[in-house]
Image (cartoon, helix red, strand yellow):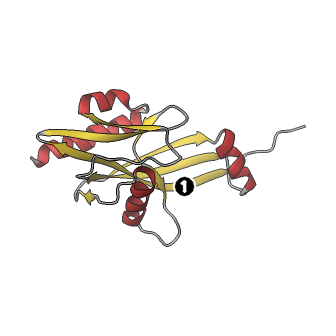
Amino acid sequence: MEKAKSKIAYEKSVGAVIFRKEGRRIKYLLLHYPSGHWDFPKGHVEKNENKEETLRREVREETGIGKINIISGYKSKTRYFYRAKDEEKEKREKAGKGTSIWKNVIYYLAETKLKRVKISFEHIGFEWLEYGPALKRITYNNSKDILESAHAFLKKQK
């Protein structure tokens, strides 16, 4: 029996490099995902929603942080391909969505004064880390690149 071909899904997401200042130190928020990787909060752009609305909604849903200041002048884009597995694969198949996904993500830089984080069911942990440790903790190279560019942008702003 021939295996059914997977449809390719094209998705747009918005993410945030969230930081807060502790005196002269900058700490970045990283989320720990059930699959084991560490990354920034991000999510799909929903119907009738602009990118800023998506950004604010996703940050609130995934971290419990409701107050962020989006830093103007910074935006970074990345794209990647992945195949849905396990629960995500089942959900996508039931909904008639492709299980091979090309994802385009736009990242913004956002500051918060809040230290308290309340992670969503989508995550298993979080950490506020300074640049060096955050860069080491992030799992994927494209996200490391995002952090590098965001950090360089902030350093120029001083």
Say which quarter of the image contains residue 83: top right
Relative to 115, 105 lies left or right: right
Q: Residue furthest right?
A: 1
Give me the residue at 30% from left, 48% from top: 18
Asked if residue 91 can be seen in this view, the reply is yes
**Closer-to-camera residue (63/38):** 63
Give me the residue at 54% from left, 36% from top: 34
Relative to 136, 45 lies left or right: right
Q: Residue 78 at what x, y percent from top left? A: 41, 46
- Say if 59 sits above or below 156 in the image: below
**Closer-to-camera residue (77/111):** 111
**Closer-to-camera residue (150/28):** 28
Say which quarter of the image contains residue 38: top left
Give me the residue at 35% from left, 55% from top: 65
Number of marks? 1
Give me the residue at 90% from left, 37% from top: 1
- Say if 115 sits above or below 131 in the image: below
Mark 1 lies on a secondary structure that is strand
Q: Residue 150 at what x, y percent from top left? A: 26, 44
Please name the residue that numbered disc 1 is placed on: 11
Q: Residue furthest bottom?
A: 48
- Say if 134 sits above or below 119 in the image: above
Q: Residue 7 at what x, y percent from top left? A: 70, 50
**Closer-to-camera residue (119/48):** 119
Relative to 5, 76 lies left or right: left
Report the amino acid beneath label 1.
Glu
